[in-house]
Amino acid sequence: MIMPANTLSKEDLINRTYQFLLEMIPRLEKLPRNQKFLIADRIENLIMDLLNTFIEAYYVPKDQKPPRLAKANLQIEQLRFLIRLCHDLQYYSHSAYGYISEKINEIGKMNGGWWRSLQVK
C-alpha cells in the first residue's frame, strides 16, 4: 500500500530511493551490451547521485536543505527522461516502463512533500 507522501518520513524517502536502486540494477544489466556503458551507467549513477543528495539533505542544517531538494528534483526529472528513452528504444515494455515511472513519481512526490514542509508559512 502506498501512503500519502506527507505521512512518510525523510528516512522512508532515503530507503525508498535505495530500494529503487536495488530494483534497477538487475533491470539495467539486461539492456543491450552497447547501451550498458552509456544509458545504463548514466541511470545507475543518477539514482546513486539522487540517493546521495537525499542523504546530504537529511544531515545538513535546515536552511541548506531546500537547495539540495531542488537539485534532487532536477535529478528526478533527468531520470524520467532516461527511462522514457529506454522505453522509446524498446528496452522496456509498457508495463515495465509504467512500473518504473510509478516508482520515480513516488520518489518525486515524497521529495516535493519534504521540500514543501520546509517552506516558511
Image (cartoon, rainbow, N blue to C red):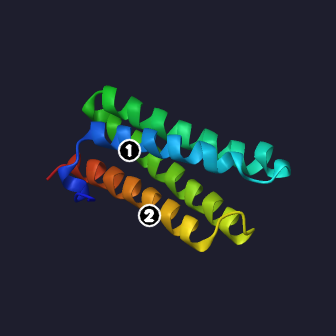
Amino acid type at mark 2 = Glu
Residue 85, position as x, y percentages in the image:
69, 64
Q: Nearer the viewer, residue 65 or 58?
A: 58
Circle 2 — which element? Answer: helix
Q: Quadrant of the N terminus?
A: bottom left
Above or below, 116 against 61 in this view is: below
Placement of 63 over or under 24, stated as above or below? above
In this view, which residue lies farthest toward the right?
34
Mark 2, other Cα within 10 Å: few <14 / some 14–19 / many ≥20: few
Q: Is residue 83 visible?
A: yes
* Identity of the residue drawn at 56% across and 65% down: 96
Earlier sequence position, callout 2 versus callout 1:
1
For image coordinates 22% across by 48% down, the residue present is: 8
Q: Is residue 32 left or right of residue 23?
A: right
Towards the viewer: 5 or 58: 5
Can see residue 60?
no
92 is higher (above) or lower (below) than 47 = below
Query: CA–CA distance between discs 2 and 1?
Result: 12 Å
Image coordinates of residue 117 in percent, x first then y, are: 21, 49
Q: Which residue does the image show at 57% across and 54% down from the upper left?
A: 79
Would residue 93 appear left or right of 101 to someone viewing this image? Answer: right
**Apparent side of residue 5 relative to residue 67 in the rendered image (left or right):** left
Q: Residue at x 18, y 49 (%)?
A: 120
| Rendered location of residue 19, percent (x, y) | 44, 42
Q: Are marks 2 and 1 in contact (CB under 8 Å)?
A: no
Question: Where is residue 82 shown, x and y percent of the image?
Answer: 64, 58
Task: Say whether residue 83 is left or right of residue 98.
Answer: right
Residue labelled with disc 1: 16
> Against 108, is 57 above or below?
above
What amino acid is found at the position of numbered circle 1 in the picture? Arg
Residue at mark 2: 102
